[in-house]
Image (cartoon, grey):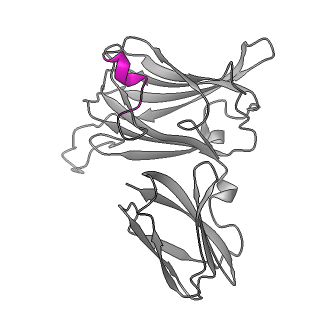
Amino acid sequence: MISLFYYGLYVFCIGTLLQKNKVCGLLQGNNTLMFEYSTAGSGFQYQYFTNPALDLSSYSHFHIDFYIDGTTDLGSVLQIFIQQFNASNGVDDSIYYNFDVYEAPATKTSGTSKSNLGNGTWYSGEVALADFTNGGFTKDNIKQIQIVAAGPVFSPVYIDNIYFYNAATASVEDNVLTSFNAYPNPTNDLWMVSSKDLNINTIQVFDILGKEVLFMTPNKREARIDGSNLLSGIYFARISNNTGSQTLKLVKR
């Protein structure tokens, strides 16, 4: 797994921004980026020209959390651009994905709005790289990733937990009959994990860099994962019993 919030990177602002000191920095106490702007097409980008480029060839999915505190309108879009470079540091290919964040007024017939992607609430976006436009090209020398707010202005936006992962290692890994649940999720301190049929043999908890932060051997159908000493963020719990194993995403507030 590759996390853009922890990878050695440089962050640059693009476009017209209202508070540059906040937009390209981290909010105090966590890794959330506050993104304020006044002109459509503004954003920020991660660059890897002096650090090793990203090799995403073995990764299948992209993740981003965002919260929109401004007002969206028809055509408001949060865009993600991922750019492959050549040996001359020129862009060979670029893929992009659009999150349509416009929240249309409730219709008279359905009483529901068109969308609620991040409007006044945190939205977790999980996108297969293959679903990006032009997503089939080689992704082994990625040197630039851009987050762009297109269309009518919907500032400010909060961005968190940007990372790439391989779905094959973030889901059921062995026998498909294995079934576990974790709750409450998100949590402030504790998760309860339960097995449908058999005792839980082991629980391994990893941070988004793949470092093991907890290990347990419950040997019972329910277990408590104590996350009180963990920092806020995303974790993955690999839970195993005699029929196989499964990895669950855990969120610590």
The image quarter containing residue 81 is top right
223 shown above or below 129: below
74 vs 143, left or right, is left
Highlighted range, magenta: 19-27
82 shown above or below 18: below
95 shown above or below 92: below
The image quarter containing residue 25 is top left
* Residue at (54, 75) in percent of width and height: 180
Residue 155: where, in percent of width, then height?
A: 30, 25
210 shown above or below 172: above
Question: Among all residues in the image, which is located at the extreme front?
Answer: 229
Residue 226: where, in percent of width, then height?
A: 45, 69
* Residue at (65, 54) in percent of width and height: 167
The image quarter containing residue 54 is top right
Quadrant location of the C terminus?
bottom left
Residue 29: where, in percent of width, then height?
A: 36, 40
| Observer-nearest of 93 and 103 | 93
